[in-house]
């Protein structure tokens, strides 16, 4: 049986590292506490008696603005069912409405949120966020000129959190198209590219500035619960990392060679999830107090096996993608596991 270096040597036609899926949290710092919310209603909205009625008025105006935008721009407004996979619905809409640099459709879903609730105590309202409630969220599914498919989710209740979901591979594909560099796609990744070094440079260049720019661009183009003057007064959204996926893709000249390589990886790494191996791979000390399970999982899905290990909230997965490439993906669910703060400025 050939060794892993022998299986790799001369048989990898493309190797590229790229940010994959990014799921970002948009938050308004001054509205994170009940005191900040009361100050906002009194000083910014000019309401001397802060009450749930005031928040209800903001929510209703936002809902009406979404309906008006949908009617004016002929954007479909779709109510999600609890059993539906949102990605499947979105893909169906994208096939039917090939929009470039616009809103494809708006989805509405009732989901859990830590929204403010007001209770009247001694004649005054006290606002808390100690319970989760089911409230409407508006999903703006977008095709962006630079980032391709993405969505912005806006919660209709205070403190009006947002989520931005985009994909680094889709962004890299759009940049190649703008530069006239030919490539073949492998799902949302890459099978081949006529300028692989340039492709890697493009992938490496995606940073917080580009992500914040596209976020601000669409905040200016879609309806929001807060007015422009509110945002200019400091009640604006900032981004933090909610979930981040990074990937390495290695494309083989022959599918058989790639499958041999991956099967050898599995054979050689069945102990990869042990604490002593994990701390070598990730350069992190693992002690008895380190949370999480330390094990190697080989998952057989049909005829496509995948190899999994984890560290705290981080997952590392390796699999053979679409019979052509070995894909290694790391998923960060809490950057603080690696002593990195969640602010988008820390993305590099």
Image (cartoon, rainbow, N blue to C red):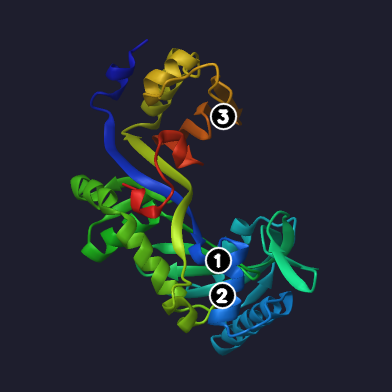
Q: Would you say residue 100 is visible in this rendering?
A: no
Q: Quadrant of the N terminus?
A: top left
Q: Secondary structure at mark 2?
A: helix
Most distant residue in the front direction: 122
Q: Label 1: few (<14), some or many (≥20) within 10 Å?
A: some
Q: Is residue 131 left or right of residue 34?
A: right
Is label 3 in contact with label 2 (beta carbons under 8 Å)? no
Which circle marks residue 312 in the picture? none
**Residue 314 position in % (x across, y down):** 49, 34
Q: Secondary structure at mark 1?
A: helix
Query: Of callouts 1 and 3, which one flags the residue occurring earlier in the amino acid sequence?
Result: 1
Disc nearest the viewer among 1 and 3: 1
Query: Of callouts 3 and 2, which one flags the residue occurring earlier in the amino acid sequence?
Result: 2
Which circle marks residue 31 in the picture? 1
Is label 1 in contact with label 3 (beta carbons under 8 Å)? no
Which circle marks residue 303 in the picture? 3
Going 39% across and 41% down the picture, which residue do you hit?
340
Please tell me which residue lies in front, 110 or 4: 110
């Amino acid at each position: 049986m050939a060794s892993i270096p022998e299986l790799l040597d001369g048989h990898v036609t493309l190797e590229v590292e790229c940010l994959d899926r990014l799921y970002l949290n948009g938050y308004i710092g001054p509205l994170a506490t009940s005191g900040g919310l009361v100050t906002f209603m009194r000083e910014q909205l000019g309401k001397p008696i802060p009450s749930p009625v005031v928040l209800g008025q903001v929510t209703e105006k936002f809902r009406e603005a979404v309906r008006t935008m949908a009617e004016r721009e002929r954007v479909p407004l779709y109510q999600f069912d609890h059993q539906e996979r949102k990605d499947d619905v979105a893909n169906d809409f994208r096939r039917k409405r090939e929009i470039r640099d616009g809103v494809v459709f708006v989805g509405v879903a009732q989901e859990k949120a830590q929204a403010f609730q007001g209770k009247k105590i001694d004649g005054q309202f006290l606002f808390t966020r100690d319970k989760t409630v089911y409230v409407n969220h508006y999903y703006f599914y977008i095709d962006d000129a630079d980032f391709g498919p993405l969505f912005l989710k806006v919660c209709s209740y205070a403190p009006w959190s947002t989520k931005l979901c985009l994909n680094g591979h889709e962004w890299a594909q759009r940049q190649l198209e703008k530069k006239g560099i030919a490539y073949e796609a492998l799902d949302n990744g890459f099978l081949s590219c006529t300028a692989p070094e340039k492709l890697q440079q493009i992938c490496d260049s995606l940073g917080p500035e580009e992500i914040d720019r596209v976020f601000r661009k669409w905040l200016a183009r879609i309806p929001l619960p807060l007015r422009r003057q509110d945002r200019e007064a400091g009640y604006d959204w900032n981004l933090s990392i909610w979930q981040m996926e990074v990937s390495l893709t290695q494309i083989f000249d022959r599918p058989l060679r790639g499958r041999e390589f991956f099967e050898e990886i599995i054979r050689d790494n069945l102990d990869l999830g042990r604490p002593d191996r994990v701390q070598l791979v990730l350069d992190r000390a693992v002690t008895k107090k380190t949370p999480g399970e330390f094990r190697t999982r080989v998952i057989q899905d049909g005829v496509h096996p995948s190899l999994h290990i984890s560290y705290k909230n981080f997952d590392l997965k390796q699999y053979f993608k679409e019979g052509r490439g070995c894909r290694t993906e790391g998923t960060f669910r809490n950057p603080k596991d690696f002593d990195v703060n969640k602010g988008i400025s820390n993305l590099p």
